[in-house]
Amino acid sequence: MAGQVEAMQAKLGALIADMTHLDATIRVFRPDIDLADLPEKLAPAPFTGFRGEIQRFLLDELRKANHPLSTFDLAETVMRKRGLGQVRLCP
């Protein structure tokens, strides 16, 4: 795990350097720009699924089940699989 942390820190350092270079390049063309005015691009949500991932998972769960599953059961199963907490959707 220590190696992974070091690798991530190196990657983060490279990204910060890239952002600094990008800021400098923007300032070459517009020295008076306020970079805080530029629109921010939000990072993707951490629990988004890859294309078709949720559908494949749900169909697999329905195939394995020996009884009908409700939408709530399926949602809880997805949440449990993704580690999204012990949220109970339906009382």
Image (cartoon, helix red, strand yellow):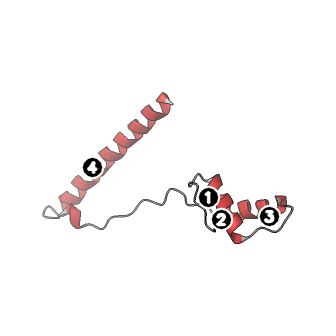
Q: Residues within 10 Å of mark 4 (few under 14, many from 20)?
A: few
In the figure, residue 29 lies in which quadrant?
Answer: bottom left
Q: Say the numbered circle drawn on residue 79.
A: 1
Determine whether, in the image, residue 59 is placed left or right of residue 9. Answer: right
The quarter of the picture where the C terminus appears is bottom right
Mark closest to the chain's N terminus, 1 or 3: 3
x, y percentage for residue 14?
A: 36, 42
Q: Say the numbered circle drawn on residue 39.
A: none
**Residue to which mark 4 is pinned:** 21
x, y percentage for residue 89?
A: 61, 66
Which residue is located at x 56 percent, y 54 percent?
85
Q: CA distance from mark 4 to mark 1?
A: 40 Å
Q: Nearer the viewer, mark 4 or mark 1?
A: 1
Circle 4: residue type: His
Q: CA distance from mark 1 to mark 3?
A: 16 Å
Determine whether, in the image, residue 39 is placed left or right of residue 53. Answer: left
Q: Say the numbered circle drawn on residue 62.
A: 3
* Circles 2 and 1: CB atoms closer than 8 Å: yes
Q: CA distance from mark 2 to mark 4?
A: 44 Å
**Residue to which mark 2 is pinned:** 75
x, y percentage for residue 26?
A: 23, 59
Q: Residues within 10 Å of mark 3 (few under 14, many from 20)?
A: some
